[in-house]
Image: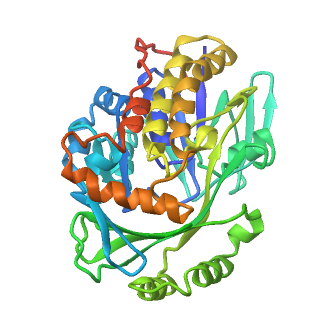
Amino acid sequence: MSRNVLISGASVAGPALAYWLHHHGFGVTVVETAAGVRSGGYPIDLRGVAVEVVRRMGVLDELTAARTRTRRVTFMKADGRRAGSLSLEALTGSADDDIELPRGSLTSVLYKHTRDDVEYLFDDSITALDEKTDGVDVTFRGGTRRTFDLVIGADGLHSNVRALAFGPEEPYLHHLGYRFTGFTAPNRTALDHEAVIWNVPGRMTARYAVDDPDRVHAFLAFASPQPTGEELRDREGNLRLTERTFATDRWEIPQLLADLRAADDVFSDTVSQIRMPTWSTGRVAVTGDAAHATSFLSGQGTSMAVVGAYVLAGELAAHEDHAEAFTAYRRTLIDFVERNQALATGSSSLIPRTRKALWLRNQATRLLPLLSRTKNLFGRNTTRAANSLTLPDYPTRTTEHR
């Protein structure tokens, strides 16, 4: 069977899927709205079965070499006094072979290992999908029209492919009650491979120092009703809302707000998940955050993207019928997805909403280092969820492609 696949998105899920599809003999094209692969980025994690996937890709050593190794996470009270400090392992349940690294390091490695075998179309996007009995006619923003056997959306929480194939995102977007803004800022306090998290009930700021000694990744998050899409796209409106929300806070918050106003890489969104009753329609499917975003509260989005790409490619290789492959893809992953999404839906230790919840979190961060066997007391559920899938073995299958 001739199978040429178009993937929308060149972040993590897209190139990972491209790698495995090529491995199984498919012809692959990746379209990406950005002008190239995005470099830099905040720290992400590969945990559990995702580590086995990158080992099977042959890139484990490269990714391990790019590890950032955050040494500790310190929690601060409203007035700037330290509430407690934990190792990253104690907080997240990270195992010795889990990998924390800058997002850009992962995307660069994935691109490096696919660019010679996969067609990349940068600075372009899909504007229309017209499914026929034997393929999908695709119209690109640049005016080009091409036909593919399958189209996969690996284009994130607000997926363009999902919107074109499944309709508006509202039925699938589950708001978890928070909004956030991220940006890079000067490293004014000489943080070194560490994170500092400040809280009052319903509000959080975080600064992560990774490998650049002069810059930190900064986040401001706060409890909020779900905004409209128009509100989210209003950059100035988001800045003003964030400034108003944190206007009365002290310690280092005024300086952080000044750094936010001066930043040129501000990104704002909701803390949300994607929950869909199906991940495919006809010859179109979604993967990664486009299919099952977990939100940053789970810490599992990148791992889910890598594992989902491996399974989707494997099922497409194992089945002659794409509909059967898409069904098997969801059947294999759905329990794994739901376990990892559940990590973010309980009471968040990152952004406690009440004074009592915040007090309990702070007490835990103060007392746990004094106890033995503290590792995984916070992160044991993450460890279980990250390892809750028995990774299938898919024999390599060579298919003819145009």
**Foreground residue among 306 and 32:** 306
Quadrant that contains the N terminus = top right
In the picture provided, is 259 more to the left or to the right than 215?
right
Quadrant that contains the C terminus = top right
Relative to 105, say whether 204 is above or below: below
Relative to 14, say whether 313 is above or below: above
Where residue 230 appears, as percent x and y from the top left, is: 77, 68
**Foreground residue among 74 and 299:** 74
Relative to 16, say whether 217 is above or below: below
Tell me the quarter of the picture where residue 267 sits.
Answer: bottom right
Q: Is residue 57 visible?
A: yes
Q: Is residue 35 visible?
A: no
In the picture provided, is 92 more to the left or to the right than 143?
left
Number of marks present in the image shown: 0
At a point 79% along the width and 44% down the height, the residue shown is 171
Tell me the quarter of the picture where residue 286 sits.
Answer: top right
Relative to 364, say whether 399 is above or below: above
At a point 50% along the width and 48% down the height, the residue shown is 10
At a point 35% along the width and 58% down the height, the residue shown is 363
**Foreground residue among 49 and 202:** 202
Where residue 63 appears, as percent x and y from the top left, is: 26, 44
In the picture provided, is 275 more to the left or to the right than 19?
right
Where residue 345 appears, as percent x and y from the top left, is: 58, 45
At a point 64% along the width and 83% down the height, the residue shown is 240
In the picture provided, is 133 more to the left or to the right than 66?
right
**Foreground residue among 40 and 42:** 42
Where residue 336 appears, as percent x and y from the top left, is: 51, 27
Colour scheme in use: rainbow
